């Protein structure tokens, strides 16, 4: 039992180290590759932003709207009963901005784009396209991985911002049909609740989620050796590992954030 | 970027094996013939493609050193090997074309990426080759929509598009009509006469076709490389 646990931990640590190594090589190659002009990777970055960001807008809109309605409806009715309606802004920032937007956006991106990236790169490996790029003196780390990472991170951050806007604004508008909450009251409550540390936490979570998702998916795609039959396995692994890493990262950051807040308040 | 002149290729105690498989090469010491068309011969699965991949630094020996001009390739980073890489053209036996790019984009990619020529000159070179080999009708098509022979030819043309000093061609005649294959070898001859191409390594089972081309032979057997002595005397023709 202990041996198996040890083996699992070692295996995961090795995997994480390999992901970090690939990330380092991709960023280094992307920055240092003198042959590669911005123009040559601009096409890949813009395509990644289009597929990951723009095409995910309808799904994100639906999820954001549903989340916004549920959270605003539930919290405002409960807070009204308890006489703390003014707390709605704080509650929304804590739930939507800090937690739901980063996690929901990451899950949507994993499901839509993580799978696409892993299978695309896996197929490129199986078709020997990666090898061909190398033979042409084109570093796959800077030509394949780097633009997907940049495009992916930009998309995740933009989608998360969009999620927050739709969730808070759309959610309010729909809730207004049921509850008669004045917009001025709602806007004041939100603006008083948002602090700079919330924005910091929001950016930290989304930038790193994007990095995690696209690093893991690119790595899994590149792990395909020669056979097309390896591609579905690599894609499944990319989804499972991405979800695992993103969830663990989000929980860890949230926990540290709240521990820090408790320490600031003198509770701990 | 100017490429160094490739003058010497050498294996020093080279061994190679794929994970979980028998060794392909074991303790090979070999000086490769230069300034020639070299025909790499071997039985099926004896390591012809692997040899070309090692020569192109697409695979690294699991043991020993692969030296270009006495410099150990295994100790070079991607960037350090890049000048040599640009002097080596590699033609895949199958696959290798970028599937989300058209034929024209596939051929022009290395020229534009490395800024070897101006965009206009690069376009003219690619258009010229496509016209010469009747590929113009596939110009805007992606590899998945092209017939096998056109894909193979495109792969071979891409190997010489940078006008390299050395070409490594893995089964270049498979899937090509003989007249097209001969036309491609005529192109190699033209590049040689122009002075850009110096060394060519061709792996092939096509005895009939290779018999039409002056070459020297090396043979892979039992995990070792051998130069065929009788061929050294009779068939060696300097490129």
Image (tube, coloured by chain):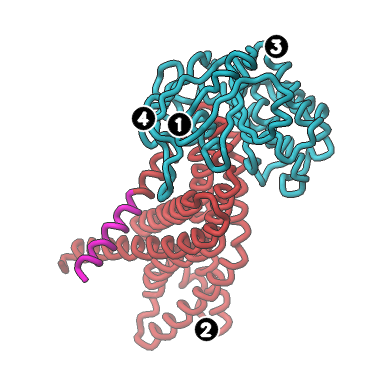
The mark closer to the camera, 2 or 1, is 1
Say which residue label 3 marks.
B194
Instruction: Point out the stretch of residues depicted in magenta.
Output: A1-17
Q: Residue at x 36, y 54 (%)?
A: A200
Q: Is residue A109 left or right of residue A258?
A: right
Q: Is residue B41 left or right of residue B211?
A: left
Q: CA distance from mark 1 to mark 3?
A: 35 Å
Say which residue label 1 marks.
B224
Q: Are marks 4 and 2 in contact (CB under 8 Å)?
A: no
Q: Residues within 10 Å of mark 4 (few under 14, many from 20)?
A: some
Picture layout, residue A61 above or below residue B175: below
Q: Residue at x 41, y 34 (%)?
A: B61
The mark closer to the camera, 1 or 4, is 1
Q: Residues within 10 Å of mark 1 (few under 14, many from 20)?
A: some
Image x and y of residue B146, in percent: 77, 45
Chain in cyan, by letter, is: B
Q: CA distance from mark 2 to mark 3?
A: 83 Å
Secondary structure category for the residue under label 4: strand
Image x and y of residue A93, in percent: 40, 67
The mark closer to the camera, 2 or 3, is 3
Answer with the quarter of the image where residue B39 lies.
top right
Q: Chain of mark 3?
A: B
Which disc, if any, is residue B22?
none
Image x and y of residue B190, in percent: 73, 16
Q: CA distance from mark 1 to mark 4?
A: 14 Å
Say which residue label 4 marks.
B64
Along the line of sight, the residue nearer the viewer: A95 or B133: B133
Q: Is residue A159 left or right of residue A262?
A: right
Q: Are marks 1 and 3 on the same chain?
A: yes
Chain in red, by letter, is: A
Secondary structure category for the residue under label 1: strand
Q: Are marks 4 and 3 on the same chain?
A: yes
């Amino acid at each position: 039992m202990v041996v198996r646990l040890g083996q699992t931990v070692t295996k995961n640590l090795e995997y994480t180290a390999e992901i970090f190594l690939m990330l380092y090589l991709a960023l280094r190659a992307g920055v240092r590759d003198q042959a590669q002009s911005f123009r040559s990777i601009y096409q890949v970055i813009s395509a990644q932003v289009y597929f990951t960001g723009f095409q995910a807008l309808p799904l994100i809109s639906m999820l954001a709207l549903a989340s916004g309605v549920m959270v605003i409806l539930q919290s405002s009715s409960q807070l009204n009963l308890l006489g703390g309606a003014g707390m709605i802004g704080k509650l929304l920032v804590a739930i939507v901005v800090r937690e739901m937007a980063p996690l929901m956006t990451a899950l949507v991106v994993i499901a839509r784009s993580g799978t696409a990236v892993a299978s695309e790169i896996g197929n490129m490996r199986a078709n020997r396209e990666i090898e061909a790029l190398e033979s042409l003196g084109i570093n796959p780390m800077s030509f394949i991985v780097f633009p997907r990472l940049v495009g992916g991170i930009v998309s995740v951050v933009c989608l998360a911002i969009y999620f927050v806007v739709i969730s808070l604004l759309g959610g309010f508008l729909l809730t207004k049909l049921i509850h008669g909450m004045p917009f001025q009251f709602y806007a004041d409550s939100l603006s008083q609740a948002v602090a700079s540390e919330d924005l910091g936490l929001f950016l930290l979570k989304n930038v790193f989620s994007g990095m995690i998702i696209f690093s893991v998916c690119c790595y899994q795609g590149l792990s395909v050796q020669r056979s097309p039959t390896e591609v579905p396995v690599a894609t499944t692994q990319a989804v499972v590992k991405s979800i695992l890493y993103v969830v663990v990262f989000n929980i860890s950051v949230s926990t540290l954030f709240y521990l820090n807040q408790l320490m600031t308040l003198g509770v701990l | 970027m100017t490429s160094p002149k490739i003058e010497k290729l050498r294996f020093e105690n080279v061994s190679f094996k794929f994970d979980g498989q028998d060794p392909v090469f074991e303790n090979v010491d070999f000086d490769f013939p230069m300034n020639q068309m070299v025909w790499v011969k071997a039985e099926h699965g004896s390591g012809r493609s692997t040899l070309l991949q090692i020569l192109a630094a697409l695979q690294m020996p699991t043991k020993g050193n692969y030296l270009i001009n006495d410099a150990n390739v295994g100790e070079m980073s991607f960037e350090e090997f890049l000048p040599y890489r640009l002097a080596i053209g590699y033609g895949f036996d199958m696959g290798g074309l970028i599937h989300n790019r058209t034929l024209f984009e596939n051929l022009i990619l290395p020229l534009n990426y490395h800024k070897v020529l101006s965009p206009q000159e690069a376009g003219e070179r690619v258009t010229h080759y496509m016209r010469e080999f009747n590929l113009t009708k596939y110009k805007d098509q992606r590899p998945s929509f092209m017939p096998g022979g056109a894909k193979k030819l495109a792969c071979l043309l891409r190997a010489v598009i940078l006008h390299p000093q050395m070409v490594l061609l893995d089964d270049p005649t498979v899937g090509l009509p003989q007249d097209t294959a001969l036309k491609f070898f005529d192109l190699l001859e033209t590049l040689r006469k122009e002075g850009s191409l110096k060394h060519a390594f061709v792996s092939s089972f096509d005895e009939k076709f290779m018999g039409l081309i002056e070459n020297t032979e090396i043979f892979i057997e039992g995990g070792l490389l051998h130069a065929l002595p009788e061929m050294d005397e009779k068939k060696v023709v300097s490129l």
